[in-house]
C-alpha cells in the first residue's frame, strides 16, 4: 500500500488458513458418522437462521481434493482443520469407526502431497449427541472419553501430523452452549456453564497427557481471549468491570493452563452460581500439563463499564447489574463487531507479559463482509472484490507484526476462513471466507482477499 513501508515477518513464520468440520464437511449421515449436538441444535426451530443446517455445508467431505489443490494454488503452508468426533466414535465412546478415520487419512495425505502441513484441532464444538444425552461437558466422564478419542485419532494420523491442539474456544462451548443457549446444546444455566468450563479443561489436560505419552511433539489449545478495555481508563468502577470480565473470559482458562490454578476471584464468582465441588484434588495439576503452543483467535475488542444496574452480558454470569458492555463503534464487520487491530496488539502483548515463555499462534482472524459485486455471486469477470476484508486482514497482520517487533513470540497466522461456510447460529448468511462458495453449485471462487493473501505469503510480509 502506498505510503507504508514494507514489513517482513520472521523466517519460518507459519502462514495458513483454518476451517472447522461441521462448518464445511457436510455428509452428516455418511460412512457411519453419528449425530452431533449441532445436528440436533440446527434442527431445533428458531435456533439457527432460517433453519439452516450443516447437512451439506461446503460438501468438503467429497470435494476435499479440489479444496486442497486450491490451498496449494494460494500458497498455504499450513491448514488447520478439525476432526469430527462423531465420525470417529458415533456414540462418543467405544469402537472406532474406521471409515471416519479413512476420510482424515485421505485429507492428510492430500495435504502432505501438496507440501501443506496439517494442523489438527480435535474438538471444534461438534460433541456426539449420545454424550450430550448423558450430560455433555457438565459430566466429568466426557473429559475422560475425550482423551480416549484423542488417542484413537492419533493412532491413525500421528505418523504424519506434527501439530495437535485439543480444543477450540472452550469459552464458546461452555458459556454459549450451556450458559446463554446461543450455541449447541442450547442450555441456559450458569452453573452448568462453569461445570463445562472445568470439564473441558480437564479433557484438555487428560488428552494432552495421553498424546504426550504417545509421542506428540507439538501440543496446544486454542482460546478466544478477549482484549478487555475500560470505557474510562481513570474509573475504578470500570477497572473492576474489566477485572470481572477478564476473569470470566481469560484468566479462568489461562491461569490453570499455565500452572497457576483457578484465580481466587474467579472461584468466588463461580461459587455465586454453583458450589465448585466438581473441581477435584489433582485436577488442576492435570489441566496444567505443559503445552507447546497457545492458539489465539481474535476478531474484536471488548469495552466495558462498571455501572449499577448495568445490563451485563448473557455469556458472562454475574455481570448483570454491575457491568455494561459498550456497543461497538467505528467501522464494523457484518457481524456487528468493531474493527480495531490495535486490540490484537494489546492482547498479544498482555499474554506475552503475563504468561511468558508460551509460544503463540494466531489460529483465527478474519471478518464477515457482504462481498457484494452487484449480486452475492461473483461478477461477470469472476471476481469477488472484497476490499473491506483485504483492509481488515492487512490491518490485523500489521498489528501482529507490531507485537512481534515488541518481543512477543508469535509463530504464525491462520486466516479465518478458507471458505465461506456454515456460521453456526447465523447459518449461511455471514461470509468469512477468502474463497467464495456458491452453496447451490458448490463452485469455489477465490476472492481478491485470497489473491492478496497469496502475495503476502509469497513475500513473507506486507
Image (cartoon, rainbow, N blue to C red):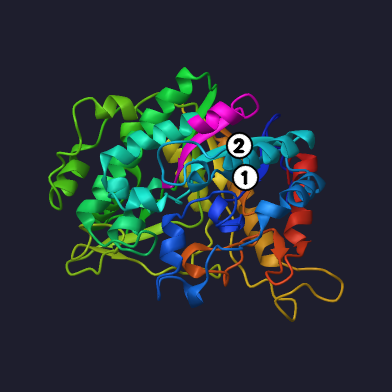
- The quarter holding residue 420 reads bottom right
Q: Which mark is residue 117?
A: none
Q: Residue at x 49, y 65 (%)?
A: 337
Residue 14 is drawn in which quadrant?
top right
Residue at image mark 1: 414
Query: In x, y percent, where is residue 169?
Result: 43, 47
Please tell me which residue lies in front, 280 or 102: 102
Q: Residues within 10 Å of mark 2 (few under 14, many from 20)?
A: many
Disc assigned to residue 119: 2
Q: What percent of the width, then of the height, locates residue 353?
A: 42, 33
Residue at figure coordinates x 53%, y 33% from the top left: 153
Query: In screen coordinates, is 445 left or right of 310?
Result: right
Looking at the rendered image, the quarter that the N terminus falls into is bottom right
Q: What residue appears at the point 63 percent right and 73 percent down from the top-left corner? A: 370
Disc with the residue nearer the chain's start (1 vs 2): 2
Asked which secondary structure carries label 2, the reply is: strand
**Marks 1/2: CA–CA distance:** 10 Å
- Image quarter of residue 362: top right
> CB atoms at circles 1 and 2 under 8 Å apart?
yes
Using the image as rendered, state which of residue 307 and residue 460 is in the foreground.
460
Magenta-highlighted residues: 152-169
Left or right position of 457 against 261: right
The image shows residue 214 at horizontal and vertical percentages of 50, 20
Amino acid at each position: 500500500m502506498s505510503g507504508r513501508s514494507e514489513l517482513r515477518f520472521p523466517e519460518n513464520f507459519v502462514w495458513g488458513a483454518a476451517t472447522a468440520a461441521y462448518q464445511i464437511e457436510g455428509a452428516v449421515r455418511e460412512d457411519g458418522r453419528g449425530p452431533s449436538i449441532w445436528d440436533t441444535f440446527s434442527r431445533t426451530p428458531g435456533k439457527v437462521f432460517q433453519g439452516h443446517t450443516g447437512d451439506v455445508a461446503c460438501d468438503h467431505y467429497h470435494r476435499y481434493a479440489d479444496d486442497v489443490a486450491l490451498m496449494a494454488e494460494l500458497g498455504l503452508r499450513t491448514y488447520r482443520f478439525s476432526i469430527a468426533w462423531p465420525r470417529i466414535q458415533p456414540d462418543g465412546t467405544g469402537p472406532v469407526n474406521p471409515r471416519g478415520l479413512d476420510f482424515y487419512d485421505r485429507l492428510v495425505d492430500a495435504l502432505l502431497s501438496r507440501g501443506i502441513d496439517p494442523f489438527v484441532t480435535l474438538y471444534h464444538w461438534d460433541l456426539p449427541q449420545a454424550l450430550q444425552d448423558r450430560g455433555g461437558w457438565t459430566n466429568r466422564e466426557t473429559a475422560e472419553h475425550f482423551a480416549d478419542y484423542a488417542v484413537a485419532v492419533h493412532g491413525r494420523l500421528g505418523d504424519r501430523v506434527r501439530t495437535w491442539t485439543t480444543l477450540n474456544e472452550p469459552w464458546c462451548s461452555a458459556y454459549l452452549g450451556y450458559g446463554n443457549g446461543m450455541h449447541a446444546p442450547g442450555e441456559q444455566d450458569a452453573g452448568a456453564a462453569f461445570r463445562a468450563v472445568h470439564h473441558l479443561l480437564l479433557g484438555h489436560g487428560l488428552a494432552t497427557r495421553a498424546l504426550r505419552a504417545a509421542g506428540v511433539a507439538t501440543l496446544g489449545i486454542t482460546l478466544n481471549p478477549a482484549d478487555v478495555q475500560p470505557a474510562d481508563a481513570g474509573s475504578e468502577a470500570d477497572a473492576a468491570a474489566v477485572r470481572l470480565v477478564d476473569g470470566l473470559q481469560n484468566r479462568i482458562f489461562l491461569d490453570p493452563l499455565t500452572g497457576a490454578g483457578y484465580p481466587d476471584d474467579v472461584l468466588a464468582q463461580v461459587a455465586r452460581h454453583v458450589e465448585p465441588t466438581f473441581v477435584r484434588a489433582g485436577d488442576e495439576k492435570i489441566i496444567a500439563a505443559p503445552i507447546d503452543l497457545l492458539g489465539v483467535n481474535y476478531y474484536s475488542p471488548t469495552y466495558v463499564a462498571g455501572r449499577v444496574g448495568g445490563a451485563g452480558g448473557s455469556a458472562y454470569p454475574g455481570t448483570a447489574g454491575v457491568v455494561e458492555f459498550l456497543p461497538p463503534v467505528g467501522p464494523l464487520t457484518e457481524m456487528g463487531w468493531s474493527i480495531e487491530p490495535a486490540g490484537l496488539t494489546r492482547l498479544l502483548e498482555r499474554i506475552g507479559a503475563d504468561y511468558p515463555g508460551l509460544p503463540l499462534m494466531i489460529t483465527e482472524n478474519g471478518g464477515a463482509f457482504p462481498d457484494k459485486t452487484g449480486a452475492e455471486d461473483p461478477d461477470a469477470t469472476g471476481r469477488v472484490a472484497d476490499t473491506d476484508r483485504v483492509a481488515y486482514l492487512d490491518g490485523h497482520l500489521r498489528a501482529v507484526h507490531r507485537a512481534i517487533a515488541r518481543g512477543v513470540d508469535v509463530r504464525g497466522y491462520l486466516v479465518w476462513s478458507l471458505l465461506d461456510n456454515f456460521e453456526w447460529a447465523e447459518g449461511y448468511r455471514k461470509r468469512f471466507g477468502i474463497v467464495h462458495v456458491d452453496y447451490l453449485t458448490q463452485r469455489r471462487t477465490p476472492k481478491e482477499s485470497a489473491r492478496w493473501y497469496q502475495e503476502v505469503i509469497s513475500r513473507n510480509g506486507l
